[in-house]
Each structure stands twice: as C-alpha cells, then as structure tokens.
Amino acid sequence: MSQQTNVKILNVYHKPYKILKNDVIIPINAGRNIALSKSKDGFISKDDLDWLKNNTISDGDGDNISDLNRYFNEMTAIYWAWKNYHKLDNPDYIGLMHYRRHFIFHFNKTGNTYEDVLGSNAQTITNFMKEYDFICKPFNKIKGKTTLQAIYDGYYGYKLEQPINKSLEYIKNHYPNDYDEIHNILQEKVTGGLCNMFVMKKEIFFEYCNWIFPILFHIYENTDKDTLPSDEERFIGFTSELLTSLYLKMISKRYNFKEVCVFENYKTKTMSIVEYIYKNTLAFFASNYTNLKNKILQQKIYKNLTKKSLM
C-alpha cells in the first residue's frame, strides 16, 4: 500500500473570523507575540486573543520572527513553518492561504458547506496536489505596463520602488544566476500570484525560503523604519508578494505547476458561502477570470465584476 501524501496548508489569521480547518488546513495566528499591538485593522481585544489562542496555532514559538509581523505580514507564518517544519509533521507539501482568501480546489455548486463548494476538504486537496509540484494564484497580464513600470507607477497601491531596487541589488550580488531572468520577467506585462498564496513540495519550499528571506532581511535592515508613514509600515510584506511572484514565475519552467483560482471570502459574515456565490455568480475573484477555460463564463463573470466588487 502506497503511503498517504501529507499536505499542510497554513490558513493565516490575525483576528477572529470564520474558521476553515481540517487535517490539511491549519489555522495559524500570524503576529501572535504582538497580537495586542496595533495592526492595519487597529487593536484586537483580549477576548479576540483568547479566540485566536483557542482556534489557531502560533507563529511565536520556536525559531520565529513573530515580533516583526507588522512589517512582514504573513511572511512571519511562512518563516515559522520553514524553521519549525517538524511541528507540522514534516509534510510532503506545504502551503499558505488567508482567512478570507482560499484556493478553489474543486468548485462544486451543489455543495452545502464552505469546504464542499470550494473543494477544501482534506482528501480533495491531497488528491489534487499529487498531480503538481506547486500551485499558485494565476499569473495575469497588466494592461499597457511592464511589471517594473507598474511597481514604479504605484500600481500596487504602495511605494515599492526603493525596496524593489534594493531587492534587485541583492539578487544581482548574491544570486547572479537569477538576476537576468528576474529582470526579464519584470519587463513582461504580467503580475504573479500575489498574496503569497501557494502550495508546493517541501524541497521547493525550502529553496524558496532560502532565497527570499535573506532578501527581505536585507531590505528590513537597510531601511529607516522610523521615517515610514503608518500606511507603509507593511512594505516588507508587500515587497515579499512581488518577490514570491517573481520567484514562482522564474521556477515555473522547471516544474509541473498549476495556476489555481481563488475565492475572496469578504462578505460571508452575513450570508452562507453558497448563498453568496448563488446571489452574485462571483465564485472567482476578478484577477482569476482570465484563467478560466470557458470563454462564455469568463465574459459573464467579468461583466458582473464591472458592476459589483467583491471588496
């Protein structure tokens, strides 16, 4: 009998929200060590912290950078997984999703639960991942701009020119074999699977972590944080999203990978997931529509997205 493939996906929380949890999906509180300090959403209460302690694991034990969460965002959870991999039972695959952003492993419109609709039950995810080396959000085109132009023009809503320049400098000096390819990707009119969402084989994950964290620490250590406006405090986290995208795009030629659509779970506090999908016919976030094979469905979803926003 063949051994069962072990998949673990960290589902990142920083405040109470609906729990998605099973043998594969593991809720984790990013920033546990500073949970009561101000975040992008303000402050949480002690009751909120108790909820997080009761429902999630912590990125603050073992070798960790939990104290840096306000700068690094979900990367503190990724760092924890990298340095404490054995605590996740040494899975064959490791991934990350967000409390309100989840991969659609198998869309089932007749499902009666959140897991059923998105194919998020443990066995479905495990069977799905057996076919691939890694998955990520879709790589989509940026109209009229190269990725580098989009960064400099503030396309992502944050001033990332300086941290990206520092990243490129580090890559050129420390990963010279990657520099030309990264630079070429930046000249394409494409953005990557943002939000640092992926599921990948263990060996790819460790290569990725060994690649990205020295860059992020270089940026962090060479930036005057005291002069940053409050809305730019998360610059390391946003830079990491771009770097993750560049890295996955770079290695995509070497591996069997799949771009997987994501459901953005913003409004399901007031209605069920099934009701939300049926009422809005928006099972997919805007950035996913270009990845659908059914052109008619693409057009229908895109038309609806121009009228409403999942935000």
Image: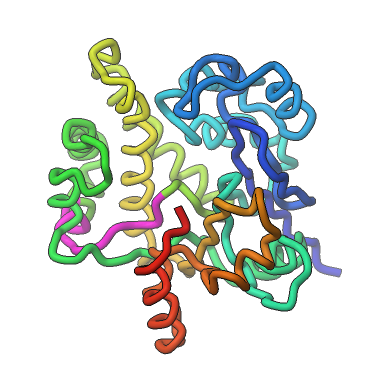
Residue 167 belongs to the span the image colors magenta: no
Residue 169, percent across and down? 17, 34
Tell me where residue 62 appears, x and y as whole percent: 65, 20
11 or 188: nearer the viewer = 11
- Name the residue rendered at 23%, 32% in the picture: 163
Residue 311 higher or lower than 227, as above or below: below
Among the 4 quarters of the image, the one containing residue 83 = top right
* Residue in the image at 49% along x and 51% along y: 197
Eyeballing the image, is 14 above or below 7?
A: above
Q: Is residue 210 above or below residue 231?
A: below
The furthest residue to the right: 1
Indicate the quadrant where residue 105 lies. bottom right
| Colour mapping | rainbow
Q: In which quadrant will I find the N terminus?
A: bottom right
Residue located 67% across and 34% down the image: 16
Q: Which residues are magenta?
A: 183-194
Please indicate, yes or no, whether residue 257 appears anywhere in the rendered image.
no
